[in-house]
Image (tube, rainbow, N blue to C red):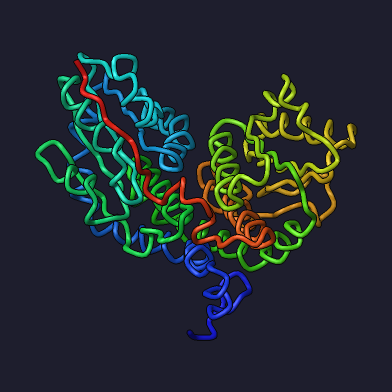
């Protein structure tokens, strides 16, 4: 094993700890963003030709779907894409579509089903597509996947579909999705925001992501050593989906040992705030939008007055949060960026924290579930025939 390091640890040590793939996949995200953009630029004409007739329909409905982390990519993107496209864009997990298709699929509404999948082999992924094909009269499929050999990738190559195949290293081999999440999220953002437009922004996003890895890995490692029992992630609008993904990363990589929660800053006061005690870490994602940010600041001020949490941390692209510098994760170069551009650099610190919490607990991050009851690709799902 070489002496290459990821997240401050040599590959030989990471291999010994069962942590090589997780560390490598977190660290590779800036490179994978740039590689994804190159791929999209090379296929720009094909992608735009596929989307143009679909988007021409004013009543088009776009469903962003996937399971688990793949579903959260859609949850992060749906509000901003709906605004940008002037279309109805909804995040509906495959797990919801499969269990109750009559509630989520509309036969007479033209629909573009955007399916996210790291492996593309989850039983619900294929079942959701098959149900949509059966129940929706006018339907297109856009598949965004990391696995060229997965069932989703093959399905997107059909007459009504298009598959966007992401760089092979994003087909994360770790249990927890990291670079697969960020590249799928970025790819969908670029496809629907304008691939050429994102060509001018990808370097700033990648540089900011790298800075978080370079400057805050040791900060997150130290935070993991503080032995928190509960971790709460809070974010408004698209960052609520990111808070949900952050909590899941911690839950997965600690094998459920830490209590996690996600919410919006406004929603947190309505009951969920009772989770806070002196062993609780609270992380708040700060919006660049001045109006939304005012609510983020209000909650932060309230948490400081309460003085009930062990620690409150802000992840922000702008100054003026008011916390000690040690409690701010500052995202450089994106002070005036749209919030959607912050999704990738914002998620990296929570990924790194989860990684070091896993190691602190003596787990192997690449495969933290010691009982084998939870798997990298979900197993044990029985798809029932729809009558």
- Give the tally of numbered discs: 0
Viewed as shown, does residue 235 lie left or right of 130?
Answer: right
Residue located at (51% from left, 42% from top): 340
Viewed as shown, does residue 232 lie left or right of 179?
Answer: right
Q: Position of residue 299 (x, y in %)?
A: 77, 31
The quarter of the displayed image where residue 160 is located? top left
Q: Position of residue 59 (x, y in %)?
A: 27, 18
Q: Position of residue 198 (x, y in %)?
A: 40, 51
Quadrant (top left/top right/bottom left/bottom right) for the C terminus: top left
The foreground one among 68 and 92 is 68
Residue located at (54% from left, 81% from top): 12
- Report the residue that reaches farthest toward the front: 371
Residue located at (61% from left, 75% from top): 9
- Report the residue that reaches farthest toward the bottom: 2
The foreground one among 211 and 107 is 107
Is 108 located above or below residue 267 in the figure?
above
Is 21 located above or below residue 348 in the figure?
below
Is 102 located above or below residue 54 in the figure?
above
Q: Position of residue 308 (x, y in %)?
A: 87, 36
The quarter of the displayed image where residue 261 is located? top right
- Report the residue that reaches farthest toward the left: 159
The quarter of the displayed image where residue 53 is located? top left
Viewed as shown, does residue 327 lie left or right of 146?
Answer: right
């Amino acid at each position: 094993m070489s002496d290459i390091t990821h997240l401050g640890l040599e590959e030989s040590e990471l291999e010994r700890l069962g942590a090589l793939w997780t560390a490598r996949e977190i660290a590779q995200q800036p490179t994978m963003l740039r590689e994804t953009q190159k791929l999209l630029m090379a296929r720009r004409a094909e992608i735009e030709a596929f989307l143009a007739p679909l988007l021409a329909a004013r009543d088009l409905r776009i469903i962003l779907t996937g399971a688990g982390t793949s579903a959260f990519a859609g949850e992060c993107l749906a509000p901003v894409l709906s605004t940008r496209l002037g279309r109805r864009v909804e995040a509906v997990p495959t797990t919801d579509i499969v269990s109750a298709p009559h509630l989520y699929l509309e036969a007479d509404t033209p629909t573009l089903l955007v399916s996210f999948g790291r492996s593309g082999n989850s039983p619900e992924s294929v079942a959701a597509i098959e149900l949509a094909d059966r129940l929706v009269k006018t339907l297109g499929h856009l598949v965004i996947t990391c696995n060229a050999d997965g069932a989703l990738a093959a399905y997107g190559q059909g007459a009504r579909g298009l598959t966007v195949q992401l760089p092979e290293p994003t087909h994360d081999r770790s249990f927890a999705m990291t670079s697969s999440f960020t590249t799928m999220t970025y790819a969908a953002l670029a496809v629907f925001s304008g691939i050429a437009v994102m060509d001018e922004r990808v370097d700033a996003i990648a540089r900011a992501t790298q800075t978080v890895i370079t400057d805050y890995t040791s900060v997150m490692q130290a935070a993991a050593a503080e032995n928190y029992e509960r971790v709460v992630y809070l974010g408004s609008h698209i960052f609520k989906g990111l808070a949900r993904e952050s909590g899941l990363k911690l839950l997965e990589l600690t094998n459920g040992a830490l209590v996690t929660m996600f919410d919006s800053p406004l929603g947190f006061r309505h009951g969920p705030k009772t989770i806070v005690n002196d062993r609780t870490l609270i992380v708040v994602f700060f919006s660049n939008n001045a109006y939304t940010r005012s609510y983020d600041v209000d909650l932060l001020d309230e948490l400081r007055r309460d003085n009930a949490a062990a620690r409150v941390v802000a992840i922000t692209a702008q100054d003026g949060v008011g916390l000690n510098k040690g409690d701010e994760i500052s995202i450089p170069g994106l002070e005036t960026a749209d919030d959607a551009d912050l999704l990738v650099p914002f998620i990296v610190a929570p990924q790194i924290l989860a990684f070091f919490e896993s190691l602190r607990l003596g787990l192997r991050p690449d495969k933290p579930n010691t009982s084998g009851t939870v798997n990298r690709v979900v197993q044990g799902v029985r798809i029932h025939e729809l009558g």
